[in-house]
Every structure is written in structure tokens, then in C-alpha cells.
Amino acid sequence: MAWADRFQADAIIEPVGYRKLDSLASAIGVQIGDGRVALIQAINQNVRYRDDGIAPEASVGMVLFAGQSIWYTGDLRAIRFIEETAGAEVNILAYK
């Protein structure tokens, strides 16, 4: 990857889309346009996520607590989410 292709924290980023995930009983992935970085927020209930090619489970994976947001700069095609408890939602804003 060339230096110019890398995400820089102080760079101006361009929005490319939004997605709401609200049916998280099984692991769900996300790809939004050609997004390379995302602001991800859990709503209502905690969710679990993994980005290593293995689906998360309700008790396995990184926890994103309800109301918490994270910036994700990995491969948006690889990240998967699942709810810990019924009723979880995930809001995702993608940027390039």
C-alpha cells in the first residue's frame, strides 16, 4: 500500500455512506461503498465484533457497549457484528 493510500488521522475524510444493522441475531458484516474507515456505534444493547474472518458469538469477540462509539480503520469487508442480547442495533458512518 502506498503512503498516499493510508488513512491519516488528521486528514479530511469524505463521507461515503450510512448503514443501520438491526437484525443481529446472527453475525452480520458490513460494506459501505468504498469506505476505508468507519464510525461505529452500538444502540440499545451491547454487541460483539470480530474482524479476523471468524464470526463473533454472543459471548465471544470484542465488546462494544450500548451507547459506545469506536473508529474502525480495518477492512470493512471483514468486520462482523452480533448482539449479546436481543434488540441491539449498530449505526455505521463510512468515510474514505
Image (spheres, rainbow, N blue to C red):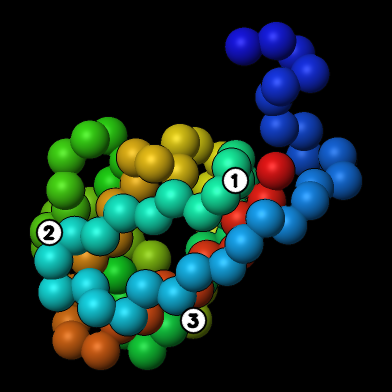
Indicate the quadrant where residue 69 lies: bottom right
Mark 2 lies on residue: 57
Picture mark count: 3
Q: Is residue 88 visible?
A: yes
Q: Is residue 8 left or right of residue 62?
A: right
Task: Decide: is 68 above or below 32.
Answer: below
Mark 1 lies on residue: 35
Q: Is residue 14 left or right of residue 44?
A: right
Question: Which of pointers 1 and 3 lies earlier in the amino acid sequence?
Answer: 1
Q: What percent of the width, then of the height, locates residue 7? A: 71, 32
Task: Decide: is 11 above or below 90.
Answer: above
Q: Is residue 62 visible?
A: no
The residues tagged by marks 2 and 3 sit, at their Cα atoms, a distance apart of 20 Å
Mark 3 lies on residue: 67
The residue depicted at 69 percent of the width and 24 percent of the height is 6
The residue nearer to you, when weighing 66 against 8, is 8
Question: Which of pointers 1 and 2 lies earlier in the amino acid sequence?
Answer: 1
Q: Is residue 63 left or right of residue 91?
A: left
Indicate the quadrant where residue 37 lies: top right
Amino acid beneath label 2 = Glu
Are the residues tagged 2 and 3 within 8 Å (C-beta)? no
